Image: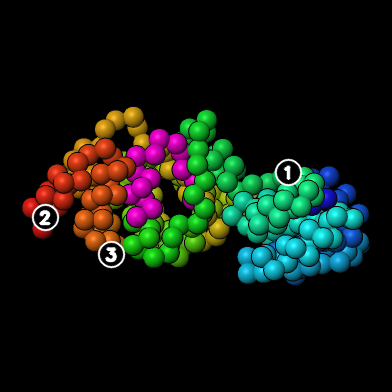
Amino acid sequence: MIILAATPIGNLGDASRRLVELLEQATIVAAEDTRTTQRLYAALGIQNRPRLISFHDHNEKQRAPELVELAQTQDVVVLSDAGMPTVSDPGYGLVAAASAAGVEVTAVPGPSAVLTALAVSGLPTDRFAFEGFVARKQGERARAFAALAAESRTLVFFEAPTRVAQTLADMATAFGAERRASVSRELTKLYEETARGTLEDLAQWAADGVRGELVIVVAGAEATETSPDQALAQVRTLVDGGVRLKEATREVAAATGLSSRDLYQAALGAR
């Protein structure tokens, strides 16, 4: 079978007994980074030396058939560098291929940066959506945020420390400066920190620089209609990101229920 195994996201003490036993017995391990996996074995004091197969975003398509074939007769353990494979990490294609081939897939659950950040955010956890890494290009980022502006579920994002201040500022523009949010950094590590406040407050907090691995959690939109002024601000954000005005007004209109024609005329008048 294929065994997806969650590894610590920071604190080695989060490695479960089940994970340690699995790694002690494994004969084949497909690892996102074999060097990281070797360090994990050493840190956990595991003497077993399985066959390590490199398995990452750039070779998943090529490696998946080989791993599925191996899993026909023996267990294949899949590890990402931290957290659960397939969750913003390699593995989705492999699971799909294994399922199609009738190979059993199971998981050894464990640490998750998404769920940990959500749990400590102080924001609603009953309904949420994980959006993965924020787009790097301004236009793509603006388009994504505009599409999510009316989303009522709590939103979870990954972001790099070098871009977090700009991302929070862009979120404040798209979602509203007063939208509640949190930023967690270095989860489960020595310098773990979670900052909470409005998007405007957090953008200012991050302006001087933030270090470490980051997770942003943003409250969902309240069940109120988007005002024309708010919709117009979303249009401006998209246009500033390189989206054509007509396309921007169509996207915002679709997300808010407002008239695309009225938005277009208002945007022209505001120029």
The amino acid type of the residue labelled 3 equals Gly
Question: Camera-side residue: 83 or 251?
Answer: 251
Indicate the colouring scheme: rainbow
Q: In the picture shown, does residue 218 fall above or below 43?
A: above
| Magenta-tinted stretch | 143-157
Alpha-carbon span between mark 1 and mark 2: 53 Å
Q: Position of residue 201 (x, y in %)?
A: 35, 47
The residue identified by callout 3 is 242
Q: Is residue 191 toward the left or the right of residue 66 in the image?
A: left
Q: Report the quarter where the C terminus lies.
A: bottom left
Tag nearer the camera, 1 or 3: 3
The amino acid type of the residue labelled 1 equals Pro
The residue identified by callout 2 is 268
Q: Position of residue 212 (x, y in %)?
A: 55, 60
Mark 3 Cα-neighbour bin, 10 Å: few <14, some 14–19, many ≥20: some
The residue identified by callout 1 is 109
